Amino acid sequence: MDTILRAKEVTKRFGGLVAVNKLNIDIRKESISAVIGPNGAGKTTFFNCITGFYSPEEGSIIFDGNEIQGLSTDVITRTGISRTYQNIRLFSSMTALENVLVGQHPHLTTGWLGAVARTGKFRREEADALEEARRLLKFVGLSSLGNQVARNMSYGAQRRLEMARAMASRPKLLLLDEPTAGMNPNETEEMNEFIRKLRGEMGITILLIEHDMRVVMGISEQISVMDFGEKIAEGTPQDIQNNPRVIEAYLGRGAASGLESAKAH
Amino acid sequence: MTKSWLKRVSATDVVMWVVSLIIAGIVIYGSISSLQSGKYDGNTWKDLIVYGLTQGSIYALIALGYTLVYGILRMINFAHSEIYMSGPFASYFLASALLTSGFMDKQPWLSLILVALFAMFSSMVIAVSVERIAYRPLRKAPRLAPLITAIGASFFIQYVFKGLFGAGVKNYPELDVLKGQVNIFGLEMYRIHVIVLISAVGLMALLYTLVMKTKLGKAMRAVSEDKDSAALMGINVDQIISTTFAIGGVLAGAAGFLYAIMFRQVSWYMGFIPGLKAFTAAVLGGIGNIPGAMLGGLFLGLIESIGPTLFLAGLGIPAPNQLKDVIAFTLLVFILIFRPTGILGERLATKKA
Amino acid sequence: MQQEKSYLRQALEQGLVGGAIIVLIALLGIVEAFKERSIVGTVLSMGQTFIIGTQFLISYRTARKAGSDQKMAITGGAVTGAVSGLVLAFLVLLSMLFDLRPVFLNASPALFSILAFGQSQIVGMVLLVVFGAGIGALAGVIDTLAVRIRSTILQIVAIVVLTGLLAELIKLVLGQWPSIGRAMNWMFAGKGLSIIGAVVVALVVLVYNVYQAYAPVDPKKKPFFDAENWRGSKGYVRIAISVAVLLILPQILGVYMSEVLDQVGLYILMGLGLNIVVGYAGLLDLGYVAFFAIGAYVVGVMTSPEIAPKFFGMTFTWWEAVIPAVLVATSFGVILGIPVLRMRGDYLAIVTLGFGEIIRIVALSDLLKPVIGGSQGIQGIAKPAIGGFVFQDQQSLYYIILAGVFLAAFVAIRLRDSRLGRSWMAMREDEDVAEAMGIHLVTTKLLAFATGAAFSGLSGAIFAAKIGSIYPHSFNLMVSINVLALIIVGGLGSIPGVVVGSFALVGLPELLREFADYRLLVYGALLVWMMLNRREGLWPEEAHQRELYIDKDTPADAEA
């Protein structure tokens, strides 16, 4: 029962609005966990607090034994957290391979002089990085698209490329912000398979945000439900499906159908 | 706890603290020795302050244009300094025509109002056309693109004016009604300073009412919050943006006119430095924030006017007035480093994700 | 019918726009300034070419919009041309009724005489409309021709105009060998081509095009500059020939053209630096001239016999000064960069602009006068020398500049293809995500800034040696804008683009001295036009292609 990430009383405000309110969440090592909740519940804000995009006003976030709240994003990435974005944010005029190469940035060390002199170390490092990038692209099924400029790729391919880029920094914890948004049921199923494979083959802990209850119930081992910035429930998929507060939060917003169909699944 | 605090301090922070301490030291030492030297009496300071506020009110009017556009489009309208230049430059021709016809001597106030209106109109036309031609097609382009067109437009307008109307400085007619001094609350002040200050403050009050109290103002604020939602609410976003440019242009034209009657000259390059200064003022007050721009303008004018005498003369620097622009730009850099949101603004708080 | 009507209205509007542009060109004094420069003998001057060219282009645009309907294309073209002529005629009419000169400086009788084809104003007005319609109709006709014929005609026109424009220089270069110069005399008349010369140039282009049309097509043939062509044994031959050409170039071109080449070279050097800052890292730096100035001033202070002994007790040679110059410029890049680079996007532009101004004002002020001479500047700057050979004149300094350009290009290419280059580009695309990839933004930006400053400092150091004495006014904002414009026109982030941009924006204006007054005006318009219509520049950077597969024959995507 190793905890890799622990959020303690995390609070983030925007002016008068409390986007995340005293949130406590523990994530077990090598688990697949999910944060769900209606629109505007503060899920993405919570992600942004973990990755350093925002710095929470109160509370602490402990990753792998170290406090990380308020550190800058590049430092946090180096400690082993990586993420994808709700609205895909690739380096759009760079090729797929280059996107993944950028992802490996924390693990490369050659500086200005090494690059200009093209030292032996530089060449070895670049060759290794390129091989690693090809391997990652193959893993996400984009081998043949390596030289395509990211903005010319299809939506699904862009999502997968974003994952390859996130994995390139060799994270211990991968945060996925709505990985199946805009996908049809087949693609969603593929993505689920893929996420399981990630955890299984690479031993990465995965925390995801989802709207789609079917995705969440299908793959996560632990679910936290947020509403109005607060955690209203936590537990296994079964617990969550039967939790009256969750049903209320969703029913209250007229999103019951999602829950119903998830049960029937 | 201390450890985590230390971890959050970067080397650049330390460098910046050291530099700012040094500068603060220089400023304080300079001020004290200037004041102690007793070279300057109360009257000098009063003149410098009134002059500074007058100059500052002109900066404030220009700064409002930067702030309005930034508030709505999140871009710096680089060509705004040329919008400011074009108004008084165009109305120079009207002014000299009125002068030669003798109308200006008979009806000085009416002539001034006509010239002012023409300046405001010309600046407005230029502002709206720049937006139409150079910015509108680039709404969805990468952020560097509109910035580059703005720079291009700025140079184009400058050199078109130079090419069409000549490189020399043109002198505005001298009017008796603007000369002399007046006594207000026991203070002797130049009449022109009083006129400029009152007109500028009046225009600012007008603008504030427009933005806060009218339907148009509400629409402008809505567009600046969120263009897409505003469009869904039935607001014609393009039209509101055009209107914003127009208002900014009118204010810039008025500022240019006030400058022209105060210093009695216009030229094709008169926009560059005041433009930079006004931008500084807008950032100083918090860009995107309307009262901020007004406050920033006045503050900058004041600092610039008393700064060289107060900070630098005491240090024994030769000809400190040569360095008055340096003070303004240094101020800009320091605000951006230590309080990028400006005195009043919160707009800059960057939304990252 | 409805369609036809709306098309004609479009043609009318285009004509008005075109007319307005020509009126602007005329009133700016461009037509008059270029009236002395003839393209083809006494038949066609450059001033007229501007008018006719604008009419032609705008009518051609109208004609293109007509689609496949030939009659409509010709009518549309003619209407546009005629309307633009009418606008000009209106200007002539105005000049008859009012004296425009108190307002428009260039509205001189000479201008209107050119506009009226040297005839009386009334006849001129009629001619303007008729001639405009003729040009427009011609544009329409050309639009309806087959692609190959059309492109041949356009090429002929463009090349004849260009040779005519540069005729004086061609004559100058040929004049270095009197016999060749005499032998080619028939080609030129006045400052332009003779009629026979123009016909010959046109014929040469025509023959080339016909040859191209009938020559067998080699599908394997790659464009000249394709990397493939420059590898292997054949590639070495090409490289050797290119290097040889570059080395003897100043000897062939003579003193005047070498001077122009030097200018272009110094701008390429600066452009390569700014390209790293703006093109790769996406940081818009408008105070770039500051580093150029610092490089020049360091060399000045260290080598000038008036100043150096005061501080160092001796004067240094140029070679001893150049490295400190680059280092000082680089350090200034870092020092200025630290506060500035924490800002986002737009602010950077305006703050660097302010910085550039601060440096210039300080250089001009009395504050530093004892060190850098205030407005009197620094004289007697040393020239570089190797052994007994002094790089004294433009032709020999060319080699120093060439070496500098090659060094900078080498560094720029190597950096581009490294982790650092990728970080710069990632930052340009999306700063926040780049930071979330573990890239330390301030350090990475500083490296870009410092590298750019180093190139600029080197350029300044060579510049100081080249002109021998420096003054603050050589380092004004125009330099920064020139460099920015040339990298944008060439293609942001593209190294060949820098070279193309420098030749187009620095070389060409140096050759056309009448152009000097309109330089920034044209740059301004060009920047706007490029951003609206051709954002990638003349020679865009291509996406980097790499070997895709680890072992070549397994495109194994199916399993995933």
Image (cartoon, helix red, strand yellow):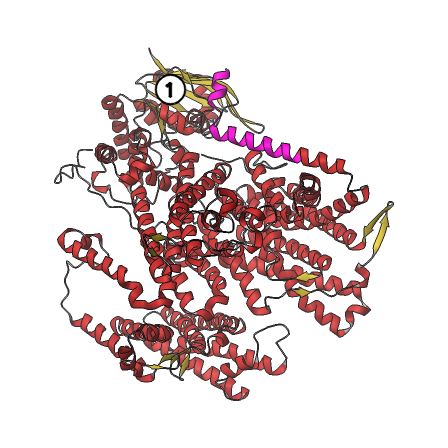
Where residue C383 appears, as percent x and y from the top left, is: 40, 54
- Nearest to the observer: residue C230 or residue A240: C230
Residue C365 is left or right of residue C450, and the answer is right
Residue numbers of the magenta segment = B1-27
Q: Which residue is drawn at 57% across and 51% down?
A: C374
Q: Residue at x 47, y 41 (%)?
A: C332
Where residue C194 appears, as percent x and y from the top left, is: 34, 83
Q: Is residue C153 visible?
A: yes
Residue C209 is left or right of residue A235, and the answer is left
B243 magenta-colored: no
Residue designated by label 1 = A223
Q: Residue at x 63, y 53 (%)?
A: B247
Which image quarter holds the C terminus of chain B? top left
Compared to A158, does C504 lie above or below?
Answer: below
Please, what is the three-letter code of the amino acid marked with disc 1?
A: Ile
Where residue B139 appears, as percent x and y from the top left, is: 47, 50
Compared to C175, does C395 lie above or below?
Answer: above
